[in-house]
């Protein structure tokens, strides 16, 4: 006779199969952008958004900002989504078969960009500096007609509104690859540079600084107390601390060793000088605090602050030794209470060097032209196009191919924000090593006047 099993034993038997099944945690659906490229600047006000939505239980539906996307096969969903000009944060929600939602934020940058040209000069320069003046004109200083030619001492005032230019003075020293820094009193401090387009050694470097008075365009020499300035292709910015008004020089090709003998290379230091009357007083006896090996990089302020108050800057460029490439993107805070704070962010792709940088009226930073690595990392390809850095995202977006094709390839050019919000690209050397005569205009604001 078969006796019935006790109830407790039956419960234990029923539990046995369940113990053999693996525990699977519930995971919310995930989405991946297939198109358009989220790392590129977008130009259209409507995009066809294609997402891959995945879940272990399968995805039943996807919405972006409340708009339903259509399934187009497998785990892919597609739909037309509007974009506003500027930064777009789109909320994507994917539901699995049991209506468990997964939420993600998609980030896109859409800009209205047009490229136009302006007549240039008969004798343009590369590795010059461009300083906006209070009347809306631009003062171009120094530079060289080719990367192998001797530098010039010319001061040229350009009126973008009228398209006219005139030589208004001269520097104390001919130089290229120098830095021009606007002082709080309106004068312009000129530091470093070389006597030719690209320096070949320490003997080509210009050590004596000078100061330009834009009221008269007269330039006077400024002596340096301490080890000399031996930098070309560096950047310079102002800040104030207990010692007074300082100018910080970052990187550059120059003297990487002072003693016991000079050695020419790419500097990886930050040297600070106190601006004391008609002198620059070195805060460091020689090489300053280490940063990264940089020359031909850009340093662009991330906010509008009066000269001398310091603030946050984007520093970007690449350096190479043989086939080893170091692509740098750094955020400098020169107004930090504990001194200069340096932090790294993900650099742009491709890496750029010998390029131009400018902050536009929307607070976005444009990196334009320059060299991108090709083959041996030390041999850069002169390339058009560029990247846009969005400080609130901490990310770079590449300019689309149609904009890159419309721009000329140039290195060591300047990018200047005009009073009407447009960006002027000027000078620089083309791929043959000679100066590029045409000026280019980038229009990025809806309120701008039509391009010429």
Image (tube, helix red, strand yellow):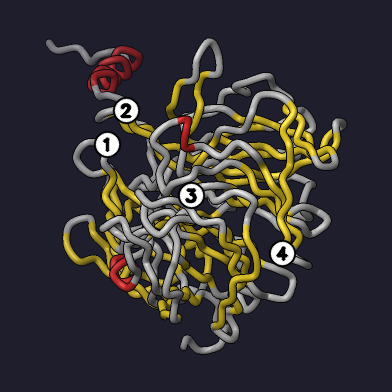
Q: Which residue is mark 3?
A: 395
Q: Which residue is mark 4?
A: 217
Q: Are marks 4 and 1 in contact (CB under 8 Å)?
A: no
Residue 175 image offset from top left, x and y in percent: 53, 49
Mark 4–mark 2 Cα distance, whole angstroms, equals 41 Å
Residue 391 image offset from top left, x and y in percent: 58, 52
> What is the total number of numbered labels drawn onto the structure image?
4
Circle 2: is it few (<14), some (14-19), or many (20+) Cα within 10 Å? Answer: few
Q: Which residue is mark 2?
A: 321
Residue 280 image offset from top left, x and y in percent: 75, 35
Closer to the chain start, of discs 4 and 3, is 4
Q: Are marks 4 and 2 in contact (CB under 8 Å)?
A: no
Circle 3: is it few (<14), some (14-19), or many (20+) Cα within 10 Å? Answer: some
Residue in the foreground of this view, choosing between 51 and 268? 268
Mark 2–mark 3 Cα distance, whole angstroms, equals 26 Å
Mark 3–mark 1 Cα distance, whole angstroms, equals 23 Å
Closer to the chain start, of discs 4 and 1, is 4
From the viewer's perspective, is the residue at label 3 or at label 1 nearer? 1
Residue ID at (55%, 59%): 358
From the viewer's perspective, is the residue at label 2 or at label 3 nearer? 2
Q: Which residue is mark 1?
A: 377
Relative to 201, 419 lies left or right: right
From the viewer's perspective, is the residue at label 4 or at label 3 nearer? 4
Residue ID at (59%, 22%): 287
From the viewer's perspective, is the residue at label 4 or at label 2 nearer? 4
Relative to 371, 134 lies left or right: right
Residue in the foreground of this view, choosing between 421 and 144? 144
Residue ID at (52%, 68%): 86
Mark 4–mark 1 Cα distance, whole angstroms, equals 41 Å
Q: Are marks 1 and 2 in contact (CB under 8 Å)?
A: yes
């Amino acid at each position: 006779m078969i006796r019935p099993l006790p109830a407790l034993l039956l419960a234990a038997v029923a539990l046995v199969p369940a113990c053999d099944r693996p525990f699977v945690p519930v995971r919310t659906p995930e989405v991946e952008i297939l198109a358009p490229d989220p790392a590129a600047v977008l130009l259209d006000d409507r995009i066809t958004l294609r997402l891959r939505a995945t879940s272990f239980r399968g995805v039943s539906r996807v919405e972006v900002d409340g708009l339903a996307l259509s399934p187009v096969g497998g785990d892919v969903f597609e739909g037309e989504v509007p974009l506003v000009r500027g930064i777009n944060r789109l909320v994507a929600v994917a539901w699995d078969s049991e209506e468990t939602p997964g939420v993600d934020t998609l980030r896109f940058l859409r800009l209205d960009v047009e490229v136009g040209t302006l007549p240039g000069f008969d004798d343009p320069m590369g590795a010059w500096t461009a300083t906006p003046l209070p009347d809306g004109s631009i003062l171009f200083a120094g530079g060289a007609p080719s990367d192998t030619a001797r530098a010039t001492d010319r001061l040229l005032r350009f009126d973008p509104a009228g398209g006219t230019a005139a030589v208004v003075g001269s520097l104390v020293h001919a130089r290229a690859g120098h830095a021009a820094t606007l002082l709080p009193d309106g004068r312009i401090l000129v530091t470093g540079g070389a006597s030719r387009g690209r320096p070949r050694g320490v003997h080509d470097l210009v050590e004596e600084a000078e100061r330009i008075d834009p009221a008269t365009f007269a330039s006077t020499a400024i002596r340096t107390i301490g080890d000399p300035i031996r930098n070309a292709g560096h950047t310079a910015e102002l800040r104030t601390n207990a010692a007074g008004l300082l100018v910080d020089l970052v990187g550059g090709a120059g003297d990487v060793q002072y003693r016991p003998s000079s050695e020419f290379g790419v500097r990886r230091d930050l040297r600070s000088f106190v601006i004391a009357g008609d002198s620059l007083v070195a805060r460091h006896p020689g090489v300053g605090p280490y940063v990264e090996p940089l020359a031909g990089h850009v340093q662009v302020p991330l906010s509008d602050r009066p000269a001398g108050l310091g603030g946050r800057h984007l520093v970007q460029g690449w350096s190479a030794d043989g086939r080893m490439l170091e692509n740098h993107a750094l955020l400098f805070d020169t107004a930090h209470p504990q001194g200069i704070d340096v932090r790294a962010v993900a650099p742009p792709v491709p890496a750029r060097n010998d390029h131009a940088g400018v902050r536009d009226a929307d607070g976005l930073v444009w990196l334009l032209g320059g060299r991108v690595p090709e083959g041996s990392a030390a041999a850069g390809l002169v390339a058009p196009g560029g990247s846009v850095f969005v400080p609130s995202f901490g990310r770079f977006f590449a300019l689309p191919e149609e904009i890159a094709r419309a721009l000329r390839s140039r290195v060591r050019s300047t990018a200047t924000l005009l009073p009407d919000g447009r960006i002027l690209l000027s000078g620089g050397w083309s791929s043959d090593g000679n100066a590029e005569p045409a000026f280019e205009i980038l229009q990025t604001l809806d309120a701008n006047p039509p391009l010429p």
